[in-house]
Image (cartoon, grey):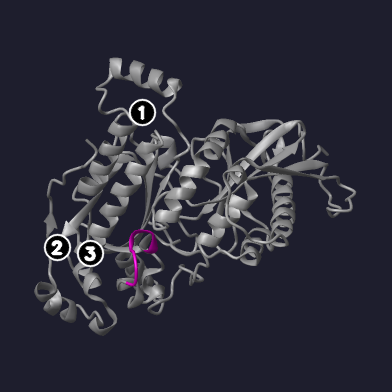
Amino acid sequence: MPSPFGVGLAHEKKIGHRRVDASGETTYKKTTSSALQGAIQLGIGYTVGNLSSKPERDVLMQDFYVVESIFFPSEGSNLTPAHHYPDFRFKTYAPVAFRYFRELFGIRPDDYLYSLCNEPLIELTNPGASGSIFYVTRDDEFIIKTVQHKEAEFLQKLLPGYYMNLNQNPRTLLPKFFGLYCVQCGGKNIRLVVMNNILPRSVRMHTKFDLKGSTYKRRASKKEREKSKPTFKDLDFLSDVPEGLTLDQDTYSALVKTLQRDCLVLESFKIMDYSLLLGIHNKTQAERERQSQGSPAGGGDEKKRAAQRALYSTAMESIQGGSTCRDTLDHDDTMGGIPAVGSKGERLLLFIGIIDILQSYRMIKKLEHSWKSLIHDGDTVSVHRPGFYAERFYKFCSTTVFRKSCCEFTTVHDELVSAGFPLVTLCFSELGTLLASIVCSRELHFPFN
């Protein structure tokens, strides 16, 4: 039987450092997924518990560069418990700074530990093209992702600016980083980041898109389309959702304002090649399926989602500031998603976030853009200068993906009543969304110049 660390298996599939053997077992840098999960939970359990015993204080500049390390021998030690994995070392980056980030989002140490360490992590089976391993916690609260050395290094450099940005604006669609760690085992370094979970497993995503605002090679491959839960791209969106997704006026304004602010932040850090991850839950389709199966209203395959502990963690909370429509909406009805309307009038819930921001515009990207632009239109390729990339991304999202409803309360009131919607439970901005039938296509000035 091979060791969990440093296994030597015959591999069937390989993407980057991630391998899946003939039996279906996943390894990353020759470490089995089960051994990696165990090391993660032991390491985080120790480091967060140890930090919680220390007094809280203000974050200092040197806190961003601290790296703490603890050795976990399999037989245990005075500081660590015995375990059935080979020896490993666990590193924690900027523990005091990340403790502040977690506090900013209302995540208490015991909640963080409960989510990450109380139950086995769930490995996501559709990791994408990066070759990373993704784990999600049982309560849907956090995602753990393996990252490359350069990405971890870039996040470390980003932390002081990230700290200042979160202080000024905790409501953002940018990734919310809650911890950066490294498992050293078998002579390999496996770096991991803990983030907010954008797409809850408890809500069925009927469609999922990864959008960059680019058209060059931005169509899902045949292999991707054959997956049970494929991720589509920009050209797929343009052909499948040509009229975009309609939001009520207040929600649209809040969303584009958040996108604009986030794009400016990304440009200032010279970050590019990021995407908008968009998950769509079709409420109309889900209700139709329940009726055809004879299920009672409110039944179906969607599990009731527990209220997330992290503040500003849902899509709606990420874009809305202060006490707004969210206070009057039934959370069970929206499940944290952003209400929208499709081109055929179907009621949708959108789950969105900006992902893959740990790419800076280094020489390799400059060279990649140069040779691509020699063959293709330079404005259509996804790798571009940060300023141009931000402007194109914002314009695509704000004018093509999301559209503003022109409907007002007085024009849809009768239609809503006749459709059987309980108006007493809906706030003003939600009314415009539910039966919006007119899409306003309007050019928006993008203030990046």
Q: Which callout, 1 or 2, points to the residue nearer the camera?
A: 1
Look at the picture and state if 213 lies above or below 407.
Answer: above
- Name the residue tied to disc 3: 250
Looking at numbered disc 1 in the image, what kind of residue is underneath it?
Answer: Val
Of callouts 2 and 3, the N-terminal one: 3
Side of 433 where 442 appears, left or right: left
Of callouts 1 and 2, the N-terminal one: 1
Residue at mark 2 to residue at mark 3: CA–CA distance: 16 Å
The picture places residue 205, in percent across and down from the top left corner, at 41, 57
Q: Does the magenta stretch include residue 120?
A: no
Q: Which residue is drawn at 32% across and 42% down?
A: 264
* Image disc number at residue 437: 2
Side of 55 where 246 appears, left or right: left
Looking at this view, is 361 or 215 the one in front?
A: 361
Q: Which residue is drawn at 12% across and 79% down?
A: 414
Residue at mark 3 to residue at mark 1: CA–CA distance: 33 Å
Looking at numbered disc 3 in the image, what kind of residue is underneath it?
Answer: Asp
- Name the residue tied to disc 1: 383
